[in-house]
């Protein structure tokens, strides 16, 4: 209790520095539980009676609690900083954590070394690079370059541990990790507490002495802070600030509530996890590296220990402190400075590409090699080359193991990611993601189906074209055989109109529009072959048969309609003449050998040719000329009425189908058979008006 009282008095007086007082208090170690509770009660009493400021009381309580908790921590779970005396290429020393990040003071001869230890060592001398520029100022803008130089040249800094307050603002509450540059703490930001922020916690990375004494170490840490701020991404840990407290240099960043990927692999993927489960982690890490590569930044030390996984399973990449600006992007992003973090010689052999081990210029392909190794660990639980360096693995002829559950394409993508030669390695994170993507059945068989569909389409088009060609040839042959000059013309109307009937309505209409005159000439010739009284041809039944075929096909043949009307009229006249002749032949005769006298005729008539003929009324008295002959008897109007009615009915049907030209032709034919027919005249007038309206409604664009 006396040591605690002295510490409280020194803190209240302000001398010596609070860090010195707390470190001295920490030297005594943890106290028994009852003694610890008594000390906490004593501090509460000193604060209550005003002997100790409340903030100093909180500081003391935090340090005492941290000391008690530190004894319960398992030292085997901590990553320890060890000086390294071995080469990166060789096996790890016995008893060392294989994922520990170690700072090596200088190069040593080839000897067995660690597998995934980050090493910081001077690079081999080389000609100075031809670069210009200056180191960017620190993010806090509170110190000059000279002050950072003095910090680098200062002696050992005070031991930073749990309970320490940095810059009077960040209270270190818990150590959460160690890396090549230092230790990471969970810290409470007192300013956020004062502002009543719901989440006052941040992560604080404190630079260790080994790294701080490197000539370019502070620039590396400052550059990590600045670069990480520019790499805003959901899968990259956000960095807030870069500052110092005395000789202690630190950086504040986003606190990720979760565990690092190394722990997750050890606890949940020791036997490998299915790709479906590992895919979100691989994709998140790949997207983080892609964001960095797009900004011209190569991480150069990517490994499971530099990835945090939140409780929601979101991976977040950090530790860009030794990342280097790729030469191929330097001019674009303005990253050329007099400093190159590659001069630190920092790398983790198990995850470093062959080009990195050989000291070549960094490229995104270097990070793809590391990402491929991490993907193998997630999917199989083991490093693809048992955590030996790429140089050793290549000399030993090692091959990546097969991954159960992956397709041949996915396995090939993983193997290409960890290829020893940069020429055969994947060049971007996108290529790895594309290679691991599940291929759907549609994508797998899509090209075959597409080719098949294309072949079917080509065949269909060819078949259609062939069919159209054959059909066109068929129509041409039909038209040609209507030509009477063709030696193979149709022998009768049945063959001709049957050929027209074999076509569909649209083809038939097109043919009539283009070759209607040829067809009409043929049918008129057929009618002449059946009906020509002057030549003794009067086969009316064949004429009727031809007209029946024409009506069934509904063909527009105005000249044929007129010829039909003429035939009907001529036939009617012939029938009437035949009836008269028959009547005269059958008249009653007088006694045999006696001359028949004129019949007795009523007044006003006179006998003539055996009949009573009316006398002309305009004859003068005493005119003894023969009486005027009676007018010729009219043709039988009943038959002609039937013909006109048929033509008019057909014209009305054509009018209903809006075939006005055909309706006009039918009406004209009906009027030719029966002049003055009222129904035919109305049809003619109506069809002509409709035709004019239709023509007027047509507009030429």
Image (cartoon, rainbow, N blue to C red):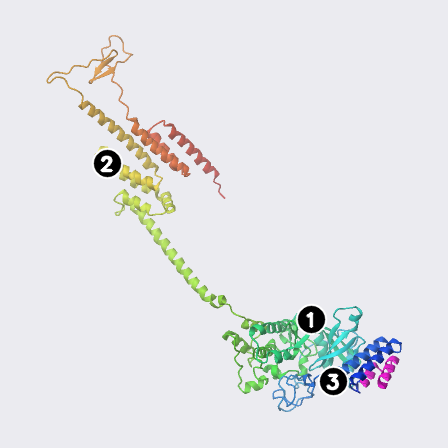
Total tally of numbered discs in the picture? 3
- Percent across and percent down for residue 215 are 73, 83
Quarter of the image for residue 389 reads bottom right
Task: Determine if the magenta segment contains residue 18.
Answer: yes
Residue found at x 81% / y 79%: 61
Q: Residues within 10 Å of mark 3 (few under 14, many from 20)?
A: few
Q: Secondary structure at mark 2?
A: loop
Q: Secondary structure at mark 3?
A: helix
Q: CA distance from mark 2 to mark 3?
A: 131 Å
Query: Which mark, by number, is residue 539?
Result: 2
- Percent across and percent down for residue 77 are 68, 83
Residue closer to the observer: 117 or 524: 117
Residue found at x 33% / y 28%: 674
Residue closer to the observer: 643 or 493: 643
Q: Is residue 358 visible?
A: no
Quarter of the image for residue 242 reads bottom right
Query: Which mark, by number, is residue 598?
Result: none
Residue found at x 20% / y 13%: 600
From this view, report whether residue 634 is shown above or below residue 214: above
Q: Nearer the viewer, mark 3 or mark 1?
A: 3
Residue closer to the observer: 356 or 88: 88
Q: CA distance from mark 1 to mark 2?
A: 105 Å
Q: Which residues are magenta?
A: 1-25
Which residue position is annotated with label 1? 230
Q: Secondary structure at mark 1?
A: helix
Which residue position is annotated with label 3? 71
Asked whether the beta carbons under mark 1 and mark 2 sit within 8 Å of each other, the answer is no
Q: Nearer the viewer, mark 2 or mark 3?
A: 3
Q: CA distance from mark 3 to mark 1?
A: 39 Å
């Amino acid at each position: 209790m006396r040591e605690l009282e002295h510490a409280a008095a020194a803190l209240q007086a302000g001398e010596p520095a609070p860090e010195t007082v707390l470190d001295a208090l920490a030297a005594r170690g943890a106290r028994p539980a009852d003694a610890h509770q008594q000390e906490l009660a004593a501090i509460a009493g000193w604060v209550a009676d005003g002997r100790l400021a409340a903030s100093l009381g909180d500081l003391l309580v935090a340090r005492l609690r941290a000391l008690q908790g530190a004894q319960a921590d398992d030292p085997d779970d901590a990553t320890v900083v060890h000086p390294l005396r071995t080469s990166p290429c060789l096996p790890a020393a016995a008893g060392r954590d294989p994922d520990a990040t170690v700072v090596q003071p200088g190069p040593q001869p080839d000897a067995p070394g660690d597998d995934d230890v980050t090493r910081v060592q001077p690079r081999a001398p080389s000609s100075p690079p031809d670069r210009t520029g200056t180191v960017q100022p620190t993010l806090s803008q509170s110190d000059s370059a000279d002050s950072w130089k003095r910090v680098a040249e200062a002696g050992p800094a005070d031991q930073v541990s749990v309970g320490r307050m940095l810059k009077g603002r960040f209270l270190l509450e818990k150590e959460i990790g160690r890396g090549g540059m230092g230790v990471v703490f969970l810290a409470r930001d007192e300013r956020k507490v004062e502002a009543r922020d719901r989440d006052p916690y941040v992560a604080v990375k404190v630079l260790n002495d080994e790294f701080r004494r490197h000539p370019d170490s502070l620039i590396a840490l400052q550059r990590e802070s600045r670069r990480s701020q520019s790499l805003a991404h959901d899968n990259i840990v956000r960095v807030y600030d870069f500052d110092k407290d005395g000789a202690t240099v630190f950086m504040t960043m986003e606190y990720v509530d979760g565990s690092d990927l190394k722990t997750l692999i050890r606890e949940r993927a020791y036997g490998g996890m299915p790709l479906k489960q590992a895919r979100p982690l691989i994709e998140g890490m790949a997207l983080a590296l892609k964001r960095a590569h797009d900004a011209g930044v190569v991480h150069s030390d990517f490994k499971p220990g530099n990835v945090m996984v939140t409780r929601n399973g979101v991976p977040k990449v950090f530790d860009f402190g030794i990342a280097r600006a790729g030469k191929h992007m330097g001019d674009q992003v303005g990253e050329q400075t007099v400093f190159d973090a590659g001069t630190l010689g920092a790398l983790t052999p198990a995850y470093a590409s062959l080009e990195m081990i050989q000291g070549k210029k960094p490229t995104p392909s270097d990070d793809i090699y590391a990402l491929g190794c991490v993907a193998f660990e997630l999917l199989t639980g083991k490093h693809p080359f048992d955590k030996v360096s790429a140089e050793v693995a290549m000399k030993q002829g090692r091959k990546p193991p097969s991954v159960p559950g992956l397709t041949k394409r996915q396995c090939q993508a993983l193997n290409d990611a960890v290829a020893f030669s940069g020429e055969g390695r994947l060049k971007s994170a996108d290529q790895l993601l594309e290679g691991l993507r599940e291929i759907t059945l549609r994508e797998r068989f899509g090209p075959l189906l597409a080719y098949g569909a294309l072949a079917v389409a080509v065949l269909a088009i060819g078949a259609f074209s062939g069919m159209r060609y054959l059909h066109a040839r068929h129509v041409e042959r039909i038209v040609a055989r209507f030509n009477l000059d063709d030696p193979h013309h149709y022998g009768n109307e049945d063959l001709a109109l049957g050929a027209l009937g074999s076509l569909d309505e649209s083809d038939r209409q097109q043919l009539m529009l283009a070759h209607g005159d040829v067809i009409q000439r043929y049918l008129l010739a057929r009618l002449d072959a059946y009906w020509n009284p002057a030549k003794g041809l009067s086969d009316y039944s064949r004429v009727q048969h031809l007209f029946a075929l024409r009506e069934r096909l509904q063909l527009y043949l105005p000249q044929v309609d007129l010829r039909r009307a003429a035939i009907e009229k001529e036939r009617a006249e012939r029938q009437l003449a035949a009836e008269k002749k028959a009547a005269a032949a059958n008249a009653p005769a007088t006694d045999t050998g006696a001359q028949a006298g004129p019949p007795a005729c009523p007044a006003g008539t006179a006998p003539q040719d055996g009949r009573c003929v009316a006398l002309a009324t305009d004859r003068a008295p005493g005119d003894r000329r023969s009486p005027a002959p009676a007018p010729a008897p009219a043709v039988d109007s009943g038959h002609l009425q039937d013909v006109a009615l048929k033509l008019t009915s057909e014209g009305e049907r054509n009018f209903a189908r809006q075939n006005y030209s055909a309706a006009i032709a039918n009406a004209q034919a009906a009027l030719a058979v029966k002049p003055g027919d009222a129904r035919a005249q109305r049809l003619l007038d109506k069809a002509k008006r409709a035709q004019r309206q239709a023509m007027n409604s047509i507009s030429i664009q």
